[in-house]
Amino acid sequence: MRIGKVTKIILGILLLVFVLIQLVPSEIPEVSFENEGDLFAMPGMDEEVAGILRNSCYDCHSNETSFPWYSFVAPMKWLVVKDINDGRKELNFSDWNNLGKREQIKILEEMMEEIEEGNMPLPVYTIIHRDARLNEDQRNKLSEWTASVTEKIFGE
Ligand code: HEC
């Protein structure tokens, strides 16, 4: 099949646009694995819950984000950067122990809501990260955990 002239011009323009959008400034958020205030440093942290949160939430809600190759390529990069910045702003598990009790209780409640409604992890994320989807056991486990931690904080 011969590629027509018009097709060539269109492909050329698309390639040029793709190259040019790579130049749009968009800063990859900083990553840190040394976080003293991390949720996992909380005394008596449940190991299983830690595993679930690390696998399903930590890419967007901690300083320990891992970036796959496509997160460096626009336009994917813009989406990834925005989700991580917005996600960390709402909830950063790396700062958990620096939060006040009231803030922690509010977040635990929001976590439960988001999980029950199926809003988190973000569906756009689980299209690619299929193993981050929460099954019923995991949702129940998180639900019990948020309830018990809330109770513990109230009792302190
Ligand atoms: C792909 C990134 C991503 C992942 C993964 C993710 N979140 Fe989020 N999360 C966001 C973004 C972005 C927001 C802020 C905008 C919004 O609420 O949609 C947010 C908001 C939240 C909020 C605050 C909602 C509110 O009421 O203000 C909670 C709580 C939350 N996420 C919990 C979780 C939990 C728990 C997980 C894991 C089971 C998770 N998220 C996984 C991106 C993510």
Image: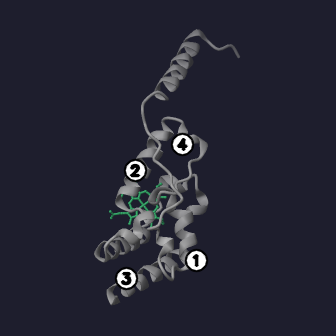
Q: How many marks?
A: 4
Residue placed most toward the observer, 156 or 87: 156
Residue under numbered circle 4: 71
Other-residue count near label 1 (Cα within 10 Å), few / some / many at <14 / 14–19 / ≥20: few
Image disc number at residue 150: 3
Q: Is residue 36 above or below residue 8?
A: below
Distance from Cα at disc 1 to Cα at disc 3 = 18 Å
Of the two numbered discs 4 and 2 on the same chain, state the one appearing first in sequence.
4
Of the two numbered discs 3 and 4 on the same chain, state the one appearing first in sequence.
4
Distance from Cα at disc 3 to Cα at disc 4 = 35 Å
Q: Quadrant of ligand 1?
A: bottom left
Other-residue count near label 3 (Cα within 10 Å), few / some / many at <14 / 14–19 / ≥20: some
Of the two numbered discs 1 and 2 on the same chain, state the one appearing first in sequence.
1
Residue under numbered circle 1: 48
Residue 92 position within the rendered picture, expressed as x and y whole percent measured from the top left: 41, 62
Q: Is residue 62 above or below residue 68?
A: below
Q: Is residue 7 above or below residue 75?
A: above
